[in-house]
Amino acid sequence: MELFHRLFGSLLVFVYHCFDRLVINGYLSALNRPENVVYFFREALGISPITKEAFPPKTLVYQEWVESYERHQFIPIQWAEKGVRKEDYVLPWPQRIKRRKQHGVYFIFKSMG
């Protein structure tokens, strides 16, 4: 992989626009199936029964991690507005990071769904 990156790294760009979709579909694809979500909560997290009360604590931990990351990396974090195309809204940020020849997270949207 290191040789591949050295040879072709300047020609590659990897961009994704939604971390949640990447994680769920790419790394945690098994969690797309309801029975696997049940298994994950019961076996991996030790939560049983799985009720709506089980989700807020996990959500809060995740939100706190994202907000901490945002503070330490100085990344804008804002609520997504209804009717606004997100790709257009964030366009100045990836252009800025590209000019600096940097990579990484450039913007974080909060959304209700």
Image (cartoon, rainbow, N blue to C red):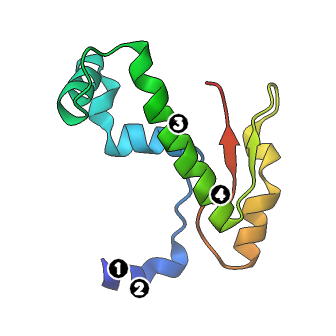
Crowd around label 4: few <14 · some 14–19 · many ≥20 (10 Å) = some
Residue at image position (59%, 59%) is: 69
As measured in the structure, the alpha-carbon distance from the residue carrying label 4 to the one carrying label 3 is: 15 Å
Sequence-first tag of 4 and 3: 3
**Relative image position of residue 100 (x, y in whole percent):** 73, 79
Label number found at residue 60:
3
Residue to which mark 1 is pinned: 4
Q: Earlier in the sequence, mark 4 or mark 2?
A: 2
Q: CA distance from mark 4 to mark 2?
A: 32 Å
Look at label 4 and name its amino acid: Glu
Q: Give the answer, above or below, for where 72 lies relative to 18.
A: below
Pointer 1 with pointer 3, Cβ within 8 A: no
Instruction: Please tell me whether mark 1 sits on a helix, a strand or a loop.
Output: helix
Name the kind of residue labelled 1 in the image: Phe
Which marked residue is nearer to the observer: mark 4 or mark 2?
4
Residue position for label 2: 7
- The number of numbered badges drawn on the structure is 4
Q: Residues within 10 Å of mark 1 (few under 14, many from 20)?
A: few
State if disc 2 and disc 4 touch (CB < 8 Å). Answer: no
Identify residue for label 4: 70
User: Where in the figure is residue 34, as x and y percent of width and height?
Assistant: 30, 18
Q: CA distance from mark 3 to mark 2?
A: 42 Å
